[in-house]
Amino acid sequence: MTALHAAHARAVLRLLLVLTHGQRQTAEDLLQETMLRTWRHLDSVPAEPDAARRWLCTVARRLVIDGVRLRRGRPAEVHLVDMTWIPAGDDTTGSALASYAIRHALSRLSPAQRSLLSEVYLVGRSPEEVAGRLGVPIGTVKSRTHYALRALRTGLKAA
């Protein structure tokens, strides 16, 4: 087996590279499978060097044909996509468009609504704190916040 491999592996690999259109990894895998089948059927390999090479090339060619038939009979393989090149921060087009839409919708609100949403959602004050700062009941702050959010939502749908 070692002598067969040493004498014919390069020629069989060249044939497999042609048959696989230069896909070296696939050709090397097929060469390995060819040699494995040769080892399993060593008694079938002709003793003459030229006949042995033809036998090996026939096995390799049949492996390529079997591979093509197998790929035709099943759905295409899905390869994982390398997503590491995509920026992870807010540096994407989607976030830029969302930021523009929010700014545009906020500009359509009244100054009182913008101020209220800013106090509650951007500064992080509780409705009780905002009510104390504005000198209005907490229920008023909650209802104004509700209507301001509804107006903002409507503005976002229009954008």
Image: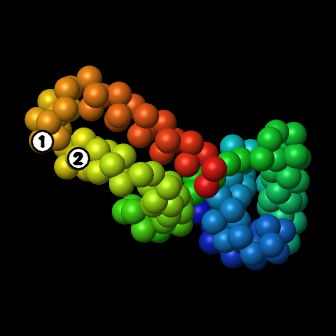
The quadrant in which the C terminus is found is bottom right
Q: Nearer the viewer, residue 32 or 20?
A: 20
> Neighbour class for label 1 at 10 Å: few (<14), some, many (≥20)?
few
Q: Residue 134 at what x, y percent from top left?
A: 17, 41
Q: Quadrant of residue 53?
A: bottom right
Is any part of residue 101 visible from this angle?
Answer: yes
Q: Which residue is mark 2?
A: 119
- Helix, strand or loop at label 2? It is helix
Q: Nearer the viewer, residue 118 or 98?
A: 118
Q: Nearer the viewer, residue 87 or 128?
A: 128
The quadrant in which the N terminus is found is bottom right
Q: Residue furthest front?
A: 135
Q: Which residue is mark 1?
A: 133
Q: Amino acid at mark 1?
A: Arg
- Helix, strand or loop at label 1? It is helix
> Neighbour class for label 2 at 10 Å: few (<14), some, many (≥20)?
some
Q: Residue 46 at what x, y percent from top left?
A: 83, 58
Q: Residue 100 at what x, y percent from top left?
A: 50, 63
Residue drawn at (55%, 48%), measured in percent from left and top? 155
Is any part of residue 11 visible from this angle?
Answer: no
Give left or right: position of 136 versus 10. left
Q: Quadrant of residue 22?
A: bottom right
Q: Nearer the viewer, residue 55 or 20?
A: 20
